[in-house]
Amino acid sequence: MTGKCNRGLSVVDSYKLLKGVDVLTEEEMFLASTLGWCIEWLQAFFLVLDDIMDDSHTRRGQPCWFRVSQVGLIAVNDGILLRNHISRMLRLHFKKKPYYADLLDLFNEVEFKTASGQMLDLITTHEGEKDLTKYNIGVHRRIVQFKTAYYSFYLPVACALLLSGESLENYSAVENILVEMGTYFQVQDDYLDCYGDPEFIGKIGTDIEDYKCSWLVVQALERADESQKSILFENYGKKDPACVAKVKDLYKELNLEAVFHEYESESYKKLIADIEAQPSVAVQKVLKSFLHKIYMRQK
């Protein structure tokens, strides 16, 4: 396993902040870690199937699971086993807890939202003829919020809140903040795919070649005149390095780096204001810990 386990570790970190302690009891640590692993298994389930749907070749510098010799499409069943493992762990360790039903509802709802985001991504990016007119900020936002933000940002904090005996119905504002944070995180990813140093971020960006509904192309479409749009329509989604270079030149012409930095600054200010409007200081600490991990990140 080569993942950083950030989502799983965030359950433990958030639970500590909510309780106002540096060290959890043995049972608290076990339960928080179990929920952390459930989130990691949920992500593994998504990624195994996502790689098959995208016909990908590598994941984190290694062959995708379905590309491994003697695995192939058995990987589909492996993904199903990973997902079922979550329900079994929740039943085994949380069945007698008063928040057991809420945990099941939470994982089921987040899984549904993520699958819906994947569907939006697939039908927007892959279905039929390539058509950039389908790409706009609303489409990008819906894909990102459903596909990434809920399971990566909201789910770990929601788990920690349930462990703390809280009702999620009282934290809809916190959910909204975390989904906004997840959106900002994905916009950063889209930016780094084009402008990040491959040596530093650990991968070579291919959003242009892969015809992704990236924040950058959406911003370019909003700002481009007709002749600039024709450059995008002719070159976006092509593997030819010359075509990719033309798209990047257009991004430079439209000054999208500066557009991103302004977006980042404004997003940070709004998130901080929304966080500081929360009545619970402990919740503020949790939200700020998430934000400070990602603000102005380079990888």
Image (cartoon, helix red, strand yellow):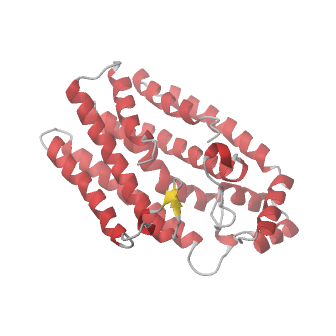
In the image, is residue 131 above or below residue 140? Answer: below
Q: Which of 98 and 42 is in front in this view?
A: 42
Q: In this view, does 176 lie above or below 253?
A: above
Judged left or right of residue 140, residue 243 is right
Q: Where is residue 82 in the image (x, y as percent from the top left)?
A: 30, 57
Residue 189 vertical placement versus 27 (above, below): below
**What is the count of numbered marks?**
0
Which residue occupies 57% across, 55% down? 141
Q: Residue at x 49, y 52 (%)?
A: 148
Q: Is any part of residue 36 visible from this angle?
A: yes
Which residue extends farthest front? 69
Between residues 139 and 233, which one lies in front from this camera angle? Answer: 233
58 on left or right of 68: right
Residue 234 at x, y = what percent?
79, 74
Q: In which quarter of the image is residue 279?
A: top left
What residue is shown at x 60% (from left), y 48% (from top)? 202
Left or right of 221 in this view: 287: left
Query: Which percent across, then down, holds residue 121?
Result: 53, 65
Q: Nearer the viewer, residue 173 or 271?
A: 271
Q: Is residue 110 visible?
A: no
Residue 2 coordinates in the image, percent (x, y): 45, 47
Instruction: Work out whether 132 lies above or below 14.
Output: below
Most extreme residue toward the left is 96
- Which image quarter is the C terminus in? top right
The residue depicted at 65 percent of the width and 61 percent of the height is: 207
